[in-house]
Image (cartoon, rainbow, N blue to C red):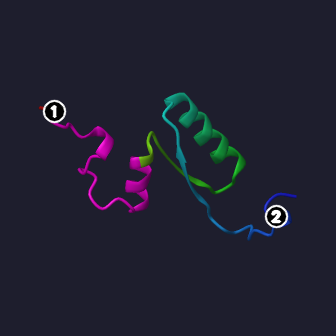
Amino acid sequence: KGRESMGVDPEAQFHVLAVDDSLIDRKLIERLLRTNVLGASVTTVDSGSKALEVLGLMEDPDISSPASTDKNVS
């Protein structure tokens, strides 16, 4: 069966972005995808913000999220 039974071009190249905060899980995901999805290119990152950077969707990686900014309380 494989890709052809799913209506996917068997010559198509896949690039998978896997996001997980656990290094062990990222390595496992990467290994599974590389061995089970022939020709797959795999990129792994440990956070959503890094995933956005990889995808080119984060305008300035130095901008911190509102939740992480320090606020002075008088």
Q: Position of residue 48 (x, y in %)?
A: 45, 47
* Tag count: 2
Nearest the viewer among 40 and 61 is 61
Q: Secondary structure at mark 1?
A: loop
Magenta includes 64? yes
Decide: is 1 above or below 18: below
Which residue is at a point 78% across and 62% down the rendered structure image? 3
Q: Position of residue 37 (x, y in %)?
A: 69, 52
Question: Quick check: 13 left or right of 60?
Answer: right
Decide: is 25 above or below 41: above
Q: Which residue is mark 2?
A: 6
- The numbered mark at residue 5 is none
Badge 1: residue crowd in 10 Å (few <14, some 14–19, many ≥20): few
Question: Quick check: 15 left or right of 8?
Answer: left
**Range drawn in magenta:** 49-73
Main SS class of the magenta portion in the image: loop
Which residue is at a point 19% across and 37% down the rendered structure image? 71
Frontmost of labels 2 and 1 is 1
Going by the numbered disc 1, the residue's amino acid type is Val
Decide: is 57 above or below 25: below
Query: From the image, which quarter does the N terminus lie in?
Result: bottom right
Q: Which residue is mark 1?
A: 73
